[in-house]
Image (cartoon, rainbow, N blue to C red):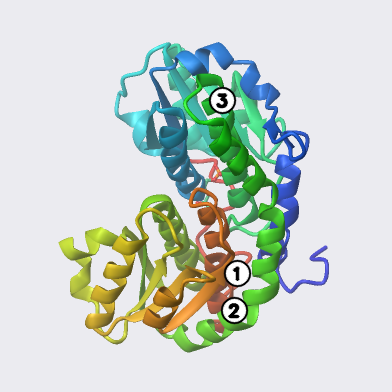
Amino acid sequence: EKGGYEHFMIKEIHEQPQAIFDSLRGRLDAENLSITLSGLEKIKDKLTAARRIIIVACGTSWHAGLLAEYWIEELCRVNVEVEYASEFRYRNPIISSDDVIIAISQSGETADTLVALENAKTQGATIFGIVNVVGSSIARISDAGIYTHAGPEIGVASTKAFSAQLTVLLLFAIKLAEYKETVSEDLRKELIKELSIIPEKVKHILDSSIDNIKEIAVKYQHATDFLFLGRGYNFPIALEGALKLKEISYIHAEGYPAAEMKHGPIALVDETLPVVFVATKDRVHEKIVSNMQEIKARSGKLISVVTEDDQLAIDLSDEHIKIPVSHEMIAPILAVIPLQLLSYYVGIERQIDVDRPRNLAKSVTVE
Ligand code: F6R
């Protein structure tokens, strides 16, 4: 059942090219560079008129939502808020019938997310579900939606469901931008083209980086803390990298926007602290490189996820993991792969039951 892999987690990490491909299939037409999303079509008028979009989720799915906020605001020029379902449901949020709520959930059964949606629905909001499990409670309460086609995810830590969520959310953002005419045809086509080749690029990362990541895992397995830093589109990926490491290795890790370092966490940096930078080339690259220099000046150990041709970042880092050159909006989907692998191999070195880490449940159906 594990298809020759030692654990479900590593099997599911390796299934990501397929999960992404399946989530694009029938939706992205690579020949005509067009996108068809019947789920979105269904609430097209509501969505194009929406005053704001509120994304509600928990955990890893919340991280997918955070990246979607950056994408949707950039491409569709509409306000987006990203909410932890558990906070949203208890704080008497202001919701109107002009709001569209996007719910993101692998299981479709997360109690806090489900109740948050029930409340919002009572107040007239339209619910759009991005769910992996067909026919689940969140799928059923949604007015419309798009399924991720990641297939069953057995490992407790979400991996392929996350990359499938990102794929669907980017499809969503590009299509909504097309409806709203907030993006040029050139950019739209470029993004569609880049999306269509993500499965190959993910496969390339899986084929080329594992030995390197295993060595990094062996070297840093005894660290007591890790920091994960990113900016812009890579900030949510830094949060996700930290969450994966916590879950799978029981090492304390924190994700931060890289520039927030100066406002406190930099006090933690010494020669024992590994700092993982998600530093692919993008509009804020120069800024994150100077954050890397700040950590290096304080003797922190730099482990970086970099664009393969970025010699400057490579030279600065103690360890680096390369990902293929990509559009800045696409790169985070690739950058998460090495972080999943890092948490897996650190967990293995520390002899943790990576498929069933302590205290965690695959589906959190109680609040
Ligand atoms: C982390 C993880 C959890 C889930 C969260 C939401 O690896 O799996 O943080 O992402 O419990 O679950 P879903 O997406 O099923 O609503």
- Mark 1 surroundings within 10 Å by alpha-carbon count, few (fewer than 14), some (14 through 19), many (20 or more): many
- Mark 3 surroundings within 10 Å by alpha-carbon count, few (fewer than 14), some (14 through 19), many (20 or more): some
Q: Please tell me the numbered disc located at residue 178.
A: 3
Point out the tag, 3 or 2, that comes first from the N-terminus. 3
Q: Which type of secondary structure does the marked residue at label 2 adopt?
A: helix
Q: Nearer the viewer, residue 64 or 252?
A: 64
- Mark 2 to mark 1: distance in Å? 7 Å
Name the residue located 32 percent from the left edge and 80 percent from the top edge: 273
Residue 256 lies, with reference to residue 116, above or below; the image says below
Name the residue located 38 percent from the left edge and 68 percent from the top edge: 253
Label pair 2/1, CB-CB below 8 angstroms: yes
User: For the residue marked with disc 1, what is the amino acid?
Assistant: Val
Residue 314 lies, with reference to residue 261, above or below; the image says below
- Mark 3 to mark 2: distance in Å? 45 Å
Mark 1, residue position: 354
Mark 2, residue position: 348
